Amino acid sequence: MIEVEHLSKHYGSTSAIEDIVFSVAPGEILGFLGPNGAGKTTTMRILSGYLPATTGTARIAGFDVHEESMEVRRRIGYLPETPPLYEGMTVEGFLDFVARIKGVSAGDRTTRIDWAIQRCNLEEKRKVLIRKLSKGFRQRIGIAQALVHNPPVIILDEPTVGLDPRQINEVRHLIKSLAGDHTIILSSHILPEVSMTCDRVTIINRGKVVATNTPDRLLAQLGEGEGYELEVQGDATLVQSLLQVIPGVQSVTVTYPMTSKSELGETVKNLDSRADTLRDRSLIKITCIPNTEPGRHLAKVIVETGLGLCEMRRSRPTLEDVFLELTTQEDSFSHDSVSQSEDREFITSETQFNQTEEE
Ligand SMILES: Nc1ncnc2c1ncn2[C@@H]1O[C@H](COP(=O)(O)OP(=O)(O)OP(=O)(O)O)[C@@H](O)[C@H]1O
């Protein structure tokens, strides 16, 4: 339904995207995931026919997004990063306006507007002027206008920006419920957004696709990161060599949570007994050979050696680990000016990229 072939876009000397290739099957939800500035909005704008690519092609429902942009626009619902809304219209007035532009017949219009209002939870605001509404409601109107003409393809650029946690949950459910009847591509820099909502994920970093797969398969790629984390009372270096030879164990690393009284004092002020306890603790990180489970043997060795086993848990790589691995690898850095911590920002923060229009 969506086919993207070797798309590149340059803004002057800035290369925003480079040789992007992916496709979305009918009824599928594809998450387009990447840190700030990765090229998500640029790709969404090209797909929706609002921005020409420098090279490469994209087709939606068989139509070229540039050459046949009117055909494409009829078939897509597009939520841009900042939805353009007419502030002086009421919610239902605006949706009626959009439905007319999108060619919804007079007979179907009321039904479609009611449907979009109901799906986006806008009933209580339908007769309110848009300028009086909060960011969260405006975002929902933006989604409603993308759905009102019942398009086969829906393109959502950061659909949950500005929503509160309850609204985010509602919008994620709404997007999921639209799959099957609609083909959806949504961009996000928020990992849970795509892992909860999407069938497949394309990860983009610095304008290039670094992986495309289902969330499960992306995780499997990092399967060898599986292991255990243990906290023990006593010096774990004493058992390190014993743990190392247990079948299934790949590596054993021992660290100490805190080493000196002064360090402890910083963290656990005025709690001397707790500080003494913590000082005796060691942390053991074990990575395992894939598909092995040496947990019982690890626990046995530790207990038999006389160390106190305070805590033991499985550590499995998360999609976040996959994401970090793919977006912070040395060779993916084209220059040194962006630190890893900046790259990691997209996981927890919803900072928006302020676009500087050069075009
Ligand atoms: N109009 C423009 N003029 C110049 N450079 C631009 C323009 N739009 C985007 N860029 C640059 O292209 C790159 C990709 O930007 P884009 O907005 O597509 O990223 P993004 O992944 O959507 O980021 P965010 O999550 O922060 O919105 C960035 O380096 C950005 O600075």
Image (cartoon, rainbow, N blue to C red):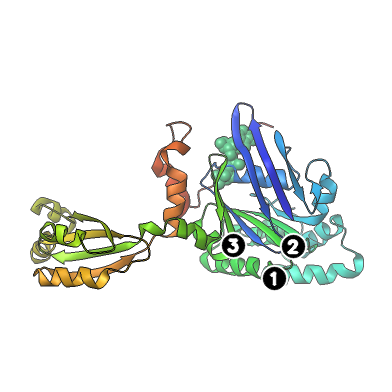
Residue 85 visible in the shown view: no
Q: Is 301 left or right of 147, judged from the image as shown?
A: left
Image location (x, y in percent) of residue 278: 13, 62
Marks 1 and 3 in Cβ contact (< 8 Å): no
Image location (x, y in percent) of residue 33: 55, 51
190 vs 38: above or below: below
Q: Which mark is residue 147?
A: 2
Residue in the image at 24% along x and 73% along y: 296
Closer to viewer: mark 1 or mark 3: 3
Observer-nearest of 111 and 96: 111
The residue identified by callout 3 is: 198
- Kind of residue indicated by mark 2: Leu
Does label 1 point to a residue whose CB lies under 8 Å from ligand 1?
no
Q: Is 269 left or right of 337, judged from the image as shown?
A: left
Marks 2 and 3 in Cβ contact (< 8 Å): no
Q: Is 193 left or right of 125, judged from the image as shown?
A: left
Q: Mark 3 falls on what kind of element?
A: loop
Q: Mark 1 falls on what kind of element?
A: helix
The residue identified by callout 1 is: 119
Mark 2 surroundings within 10 Å by alpha-carbon count, few (fewer than 14), some (14 through 19), many (20 or more): many
Residue in the image at 10% along x and 63% along y: 234
Location of the C terminus (image quadrant): top right
